[in-house]
Image (tube, helix red, strand yellow):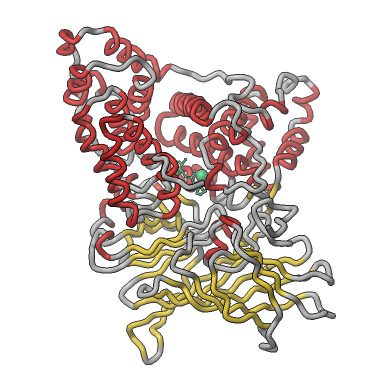
Amino acid sequence: MSALSKTDPTSYSNPTECLVEHIHLDLKINFDRHTLSGSAVLSIKKINPETDLILDTRDLTIFSIKNNESKEPLEYTLNEPDGCFGSKLTIQLPELEFFSMEVLIEYETKENCTALQWLPARLTKGKRHPYLYSQCQAIHCRSIIPLQDTPCVKCPFTAKVTAPSDLKVLMSALHEDINEVEGDPAWSEFNFRQKIPMPSCLMSIVCGDITYRDVGPRTRVWAEPELVEQAAWEFAETENMLQVAEELMGPYVWGQYDLVVLPPSFPFGGMENPCITFVTPTLIAGDRSLADVVAHEIAHSWTGNLVTNKNPNHFWLNEGNTMFFERKIDGVLRGGEKLRQFKSLTGWNELQTAVDSLGADNPYTRLVLDMKGVDPDDAFSSIPYEKGHALLFYLEQLLGGPEVFEPFLREYIKHFRFQSITTADWKEFLLEYFANEVKEGKLDEVDWDAWLYGLGMPPVKPHYDQSLGEDVDHLIKRWLECTNDEVDSFYTVDIVDFVPVQMMHFLDELRKKERLSQVKVQKMGEVYLLNSVKNFEVRWRWIRLAIYCQYKEIVEMALEFVAKIGRLHFIAPLYKDLYNWEFSRDRALKTFQETRDNMHYISVLSVERELELDSK
Ligand code: BES
Ligand code: ZN
């Protein structure tokens, strides 16, 4: 096993000795071979004159490595691969009198590249053209570019991407010009520039038959033509969200904020790639009710993309802060402080569920993780999101509420923007900023060790305003207490005033109680129109509740859901539910076998785990 870096337990690179300061990519998209091929020019700065340049790679074919000015070859060694960390690439640098140089690497990705999903035309909406998209976070960028694949390195990049002329290419950058390849109009070159230094996990590319609608002065919504109108309507509030975010966090520095609605196999809800957030089509609910995911990705433009965790141990700094801002933005634009409080409470419940399912002694339940030798995809859970959010929510209360905490957050971002930081940096800044409050003893009760390094649930539960939960709890009680003969007392109007998060809470809580009878489940589906609900968050919870109650009629709908959707947050638990119920187990296995070739690599791995098919 090659030594991993001191600054990042998931990277081989040595940025404290030799730093990549700029990347230029020249890549061709080959749909026939499912590869990207071309070159990367890395501009490097040597900090230690004796050092080699060490890069991360995974499943790359390296053709040559040269000094970009002289075109002299450079000696290099590519180690044997080691699982998710890939192969360490060590490039010998000439004895330099000067400390900067450009290294040119000619290479090609392989078909099994973990960052890319190549979709055949039949898996797109239009069914006419193939589609390609990337997902680099956490450590998949090394499977498309040889680089220092660690968030402690941030660099700007430029790119020229050659692709079929009937398709469009987007990257996590501003678009420059598009030119037809001279003498070959079937191919076009798309040029990009990202001036702001960004970590490798935010590198991204999409190529497909996509088009856009402008929905604001700096926002285009991109999607396949069949979906673009719907998508543009769904995300029409993006500019409002950006404005609220700017009030909370300071100026938006990335220029454009576009969204691209990917095909349903995309394994996440959203991904904050700079200038072009990626989202799952399951956000299209027809009523804008799931746009809080967009608020989340917008918030990352500051927390994560400007102030970045130094390595995956401190991932909570990205996601905990982002959850906190997501709920602030949502509160301002939708249901005020009451809604923020209630969503925060459902976040606490989600944290409890995650701790229960991982086991309270699981090291992944810690806020600050120890990622040495760990595949970040294996450690992924809602813990950093919700434990991180709970800590910030708790601190806000102790320190005197939003009026004092929001200015602190703005300062925090201003202070650390363009940097990559650790939990210690965050804590030191907080204690310094609130020196007076600390003197007054306002933080005396905080058990820092337990919050940051403790296993399981946090040591204290913050106070949450639960008023939005009252009607829901009342309705839950009615369903639990009534007899089968009394189900006619339920009507559609029971839930007519519920906002989606109340409906979600209703279904989540019922799944923690004793099973409802078949008569009740059937009635609930009918009166609340749950079998045709378009909101995927509600639909998913309804299916899970019905499975929990062993309502056989739901299995068809559940299988159709997991066959079509790739979003992990939905399908991993749903596959697990189906697998744990003997009645549906074989059909779940069969559906997975039939659809796995259409699924994203990350989804396949985690569903395999749920279905006990993994070899690990
Ligand atoms: N950056 C994450 C997605 C991610 C994290 C991908 C780690 C790979 C590794 C993104 O911002 C995110 O958190 N997405 C959530 C949405 C959200 C509203 C909680 C998701 O996809 O569910
Ligand atoms: Zn996030």
**Rendered-image quadrant of the N terminus:** bottom right
259 over 505 or under it: above or below = below
* One can see residue 271 in this view: yes
Q: Residue furthest bottom?
A: 183
Quadrant assignment, res 462 = top right
Q: Residue at x 26, y 51 (%)?
A: 230
Q: Residue at x 38, y 52 (%)?
A: 266
Quadrant assignment, res 386 = top right
Is 54 on the left-hand or right-hand side of 165?
Answer: right
427 over 134 or under it: above or below = above
501 over 226 or under it: above or below = above
**Between residues 336 and 192, which one lies in front from this camera angle?**
192
* One can see residue 239 in this view: no
Q: How many marks?
A: 0
Q: Residue at x 32, y 41 (%)?
A: 288
487 over 403 or under it: above or below = above
Is 67 on the left-hand or right-hand side of 606?
Answer: right
Residue 419: % across, % down: 69, 53
Residue 330: % across, % down: 45, 36
Is 15 on the left-hand or right-hand side of 298?
Answer: right
Residue 470: % across, % down: 38, 14
Quadrant assignment, res 394 = top right
Q: Residue at x 58, y 52 (%)?
A: 305
**Between residues 492 and 616, which one lies in front from this camera angle?**
616
Residue 257: % across, % down: 46, 56
